[in-house]
Image (cartoon, grey):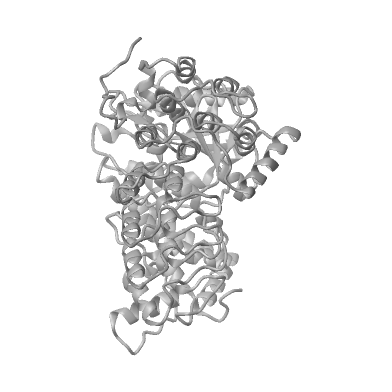
Amino acid sequence: MQGANTPLAEFSKSLRQKRDDEGQEEHAEFFPMYTVHLEALLEMAEILPHEVLLADGVLTLFDRSKGQAMFVSHQWIGVGHPDPTLQQLRVLQDAISNSLKGLCHASVDVITEVLFGLRSWSLAEALKSKPVFVWYDYFSCPQQRKKAPDPEGSLQHAIDSIPAYVSKCSLFVALCPAVESADQSRVYNRSTWLDRGWCRLEWTMWNLSSVGEPVIFVKGARHLEVSKISQLRSVGEAAFSLEEDRHKVSKVLQVEFKKSLVKCLERGDLAKYRILLGWQKLCLRGLPAVPMESAEVTVPDYVAPSDSRAKTILLTRFLHQNGFRQPLERRLGWTPLCYAAMHGDPVLVSALLEQRASPNDRIHCSNLDLLLASKASVLELAARCRSNEVLKLLISERADLDGRDSIGVTALLAAAYSKDAAAVRLLCQARADPNVKNNFTDTAWHTACEAGSLPVLIELRAQSDGLTPNLERCLHTLSLGPGTAEAVHWLVDARADVNERMKPETFFISFVFAAKSLEYRFRGSRSQFCSIAYHHCGATPLVFAILAGNFEVAAALSIRGADSRIKNFRGKSAEDLAAEMSAPSYLMELLERSDVCRFTTESRIIGAKQTSIESLRSEDYFEI
């Protein structure tokens, strides 16, 4: 075992022995796991609260011996009710029904296929394997607190039980179609789902669980996407409607991280244990509770140093807790400074630098869970984990701003991917080059588009010293990620070509696309990656958005003048591919009238009301 003879290794061994003697501990369930049978969900014509469904006998206590559970994570789009006009519920019902009838298939996102080798995934097969019981918060958790106090605390008990509910589920659905709020004041979509505090908590719980199945993103009645990507996200920095909810979330996270850390030690997985110590710091950032320190999972036999300075004690305790004997030691490719950069504590990083740790230190092995390639620098780690105080310190210590990992990613590209505009500003002001390309010819501009981050794009423009940015392929990249209509409008305003034709820039990219095209033609693979590779040459951003199932972006492109009749080198136009993919009716209408400057009622769904264009205000409509 790596780290043998350290107190951490001995502690891990003792925990493993204790587990073998006492058995595996289950997640605590403080409130029963009420669910709705899938058939009952499909027949629902209204969404009623937990108390009503319980009284009507619709709810079922979940039992693994009777079937499997599906966890549905969604945004509330109404006040006091999650879905007043049933927009989301109808999409979920139709998506499940269409999957069972074979009318739609879930696509695998490109990164999941590349990193994990998952080419296809069938929701129908998963649903048919065992009876399905659905957990949905408004059905499954007490809602009476909306009208009266909850003296027994049953709602908090249900919230505290979310990790237990997630661990019992075999399927996790992120219900995030593009829909309007009840008052038509805003649009909800996948991007806003990612930024909601409760949704991010549930996603984090799924990532911490040992289920290992991908997340199913329901984007439309016929459009599902599965992903195994678990990005580092701070739950505390996400949006909550009620400030009091941060206290509830904080308690749940602390308990779950402690259990996950103990599980890693029981398995002897010290590398993942160290990663989790850093990840929990990030997740708890912005929450009212103090982050769970090593005192919560205490590694025994710590001996305080004779030097009683606070910095020295902090460093020695950190080394002890992480199973290191020396400040410059390397275990499984990582040094203490690499983990300290994740933690985000500048005092700790300063203490290691004083011990001659290098500000240009790097990891020596990749980590799929963190989307980190080998040779990633500590500066990149700090940027990816949004540790801006550490970033400032490393910059002041003359860290290499444009140092690259094994796939060419720099700290600036990592900050852009993490959607951290403040970190982008720090790095650009320190003279990091936003036009440096990774091995896939992507710059910081492309990475911001891939992440769907409009604030980062705005910051990059602000730091460009008045120079006109090179926006080639930016709309293509935005179309593949969780892009939004707002970002489309901003890029077009910045002179991005809405009808740009795609052409690979390197031999390597051309070779990969050619290989995937052959897989598409001769092996019948219809994965998202294979479809894009087959159709990419000469394709416009509109074609890319349709192939990726990003119909909100496709509609915004159409509104901004994208020509749906331009054919790629395969002889396919956006209209052709949209018809083949059964695109939503509002998009088909826009594509058929792409030569007409017109807003319809449906066009509000794709963000016309959110555009930054001065001439396109929310109340304006253009008719022939």
Quadrant in which the N terminus is drawn: bottom right
Furthest residue toward top: 624
Displayed quadrant of residue 600 = top left
- From the viewer's perspective, tell me whether residue 263 is left or right of residue 598: right
Q: Is residue 285 above or below residue 74?
A: below
Across and down, in percent, residue 235 comes to 36, 50
Across and down, in percent, residue 570 comes to 65, 28
Quadrant in which the C terminus is drawn: top left
Displayed quadrant of residue 284 = bottom left
Q: Is residue 563 above or below residue 25?
A: above
Q: Is residue 521 above or below residue 583?
A: below
Rendered residue at 44%/80% (across/down): 327
- From the viewer's perspective, tell me whether residue 481 is left or right of residue 539: left
Rendered residue at 61%/46% (across/down): 509
Across and down, in percent, residue 265 comes to 53, 67
Residue 561 appears in view: yes
Furthest residue toward right: 522
Rendered residue at 48%/67% (across/down): 274
- From the viewer's perspective, tell me whether residue 263 is left or right of residue 120: left
- Most foreground residue, 545 or 92: 545
Residue 213 appears in view: no
Displayed quadrant of residue 292 = bottom left
Across and down, in percent, residue 172 comes to 51, 40
